[in-house]
Image: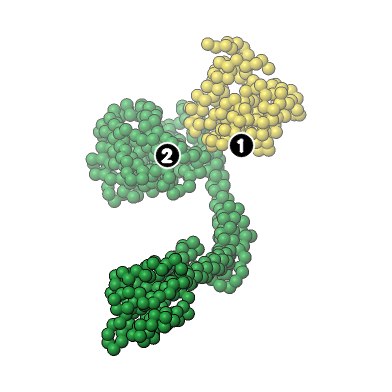
Chain colours: A yellow, B green
Amino acid sequence: MKCFPDNSKIVEILLVEDNPGDIRLTTEAFKSVKMANNLHIARDGEEAIQFLRKEQPFEKAITPDIILLDLNLPKLDGREVLEIIKNDVTLKTIPIVILTSSEAEIDIVQSYNLNANCYVVKPVDFIKFLSVVQSINDFWLTVVKLPSA
Amino acid sequence: MVTIILTINILVLIFSITLQMGFIFYNERNFLQKRLLLTAKVVSLQTIASIEFLDPIAAKENLLTLQILTEIQKACIYDITGTVFAFFSTIQTDNITIDSPLICPSIYKRNTMYQFDKLYIYTDIISDNNKIGTLYFEYDLTSLYESLRNILYFNLIITLLGLLLSYFISSYLQRLISKPIISLGEITRNFTRTHNYNLRAIQHDNDELGELVNDFNNMIEEMEKHEIKLNKVIKDLRNSNEELERFAYICSHDLQEPLRMISNYTQLLSQQYDAVLDENAEEYMGYITGGAARMRDLINDILTYSRIGYTSDNITLINIQDIIDNMLKTMASSIKERNAIITVDPMPVIHGYKVLITQVFQNLLVNALKFCKDRQPIIHIGCKRISQGWEFSVQDNGIGINQLYYNKIFEIFKRLNRSEEYEGTGIGLSICKKAVEYHGGNIWVSSIVGEGSTFFFTIPDHNLTTSK
């Protein structure tokens, strides 16, 4: 059922996350899934927008295939970033996975209202986190046919 | 009110007029009768000589003196044989009856006789204790009746005028009294509709009504003060609720972050440094992740507990049967694992908060399964209609609860057993209690240690629910 058997393609992932512990965890997790990927990091909302718009100092940035977005970020927070991306004609097709520790209903509802493609609660358990990363990988990068960037 | 009083008045007046007229009629007739008998006596005395001297002309002259009383239309003197001796009649055509000697004896027994509008008077003419003749005359009562009728009419007119006058006076007085009451009523209605605290009733006088108006105004003032106080309390409450919401959010997000770091990195450590770490390190790391997991459960449970009452959920019609069926489906694996036998009474459709009711049943069922560790769980979910509500029960055959702890088990984080024996945060029953009480119901337990427990809770009918 794989629609994207092209293993040579390197998946570009933008992780918007301020917590270094979480950055490291996500990096480790993506290392362990057998998939060619390139993880780019933005440490706050502003950086994420600059990265996506290829503004200084990210003139050489690559448009990501998927964005993993934390909700609570310094400067622009995740909701604002989500809103900006989904209102930007050139960026709105990039799938966005909200990856956060918040289980609050209001965050979930708000995210989907802002057209987030997926909402994932970061599990306490690392093994579970691995399987979450695995399923993000399966779902967004192989099963779903994405418009080519 | 006025009509009732007037009707009573009219009835009393009619009664008194009737009595009065009867009395006047009786009196007047009596008086007339006496006067006429006296007149007759006088005339009869005057006629003695003319009868004895057989002088009808003189007798007639005597009779004619009766004409002074115009009501006397006929008069006649009979001799001892009953023959007409002398007579006069102002009615010309009436001779015949007077001529007839037969009239006299037939009505002679009494001195007076009434016939329609006529009064007949008979008097014996007596000389030296011997009856020598009879004096008879007719008195026309029409004028008497007429004057009586006039009195009656006069009375009626006076009464009618009096009634009219009293009607006007009383309705004027009523308006005078009820005007402030009606205006007070209008202001009350207006106030109820608009809640405008600037409304005041106008005080006209210092009488009882004025006092009432004054009291009313004071009441509105007091209510205004009360509402200002109440609004302040509501505002404070709203602020503290918002703070609680923020706190709950911090719990769900910010407190989870460090926990995730602790447990994730411990696991990462054990995964990646397996070769370097010894058994002790593995055990310690197990405690670290276990503690973090437990902390997470506690945070989530506190959140659930604190959110009861802040639910956006509304009271709806909920089918308890559906709730239980769904619950049994989602818990199917743990029920099967424990090989539990669960029976369920037919369940009603009630008004309530679906999420909360579901939590109550679920927590009770989880407990029932949990505390039957050493035996096959036999669980019955019951339902009974009580006055003004429903009583539900969850019965198990588990370890039971000592009566000493019947109330303690509903306290938050209260546990009766070590967590190694029976896992859990000790908040399930507190959530049940809060959820049931939020519906205005009660929850309690009855149990025999070693044989099992039955948890009961009531959900009152919606219209009787006092909360919210």
The residue carrying mark 2 is B351
Q: Residue at x 46, y 28 (%)?
A: B274
Q: Residue at x 30, y 37 (%)?
A: B382
Residue found farthest to the front: B54
Q: Numbered disc 1: what chain?
A: A
Residue toward you, B344 or B397: B344
Residue toward you, B354 or A115: B354
The number of numbered badges drawn on the structure is 2
Residues packed near mark 2 inside 10 Å, few (<14), some (14 to 19) or many (20 plus): many
Q: Numbered disc 2: what chain?
A: B
Q: Is residue B142 left or right of residue A80?
A: left
Give the structural element (helix, strand or loop) at label 1: loop
Residues packed near mark 1 inside 10 Å, few (<14), some (14 to 19) or many (20 plus): many
Q: In the figure, B323 relative to B236: above or below?
A: above
The amino acid type, in three-letter code, at marker 1 is Asn
Q: Which mark is residue B348?
A: none
Can you give x and y, in whole percent of width and height, for residue B56 in the image? 39, 80
Can you give x and y, in whole percent of width and height, for residue B165 in the image? 55, 68
Residue toward you, B261 or B347: B347
The residue carrying mark 1 is A72
Circles 2 and 1: CB atoms closer than 8 Å:
no
The amino acid type, in three-letter code, at marker 2 is His
Q: Can the viewer see residue B218 in this picture? A: no
Give the structural element (helix, strand or loop) at label 2: strand
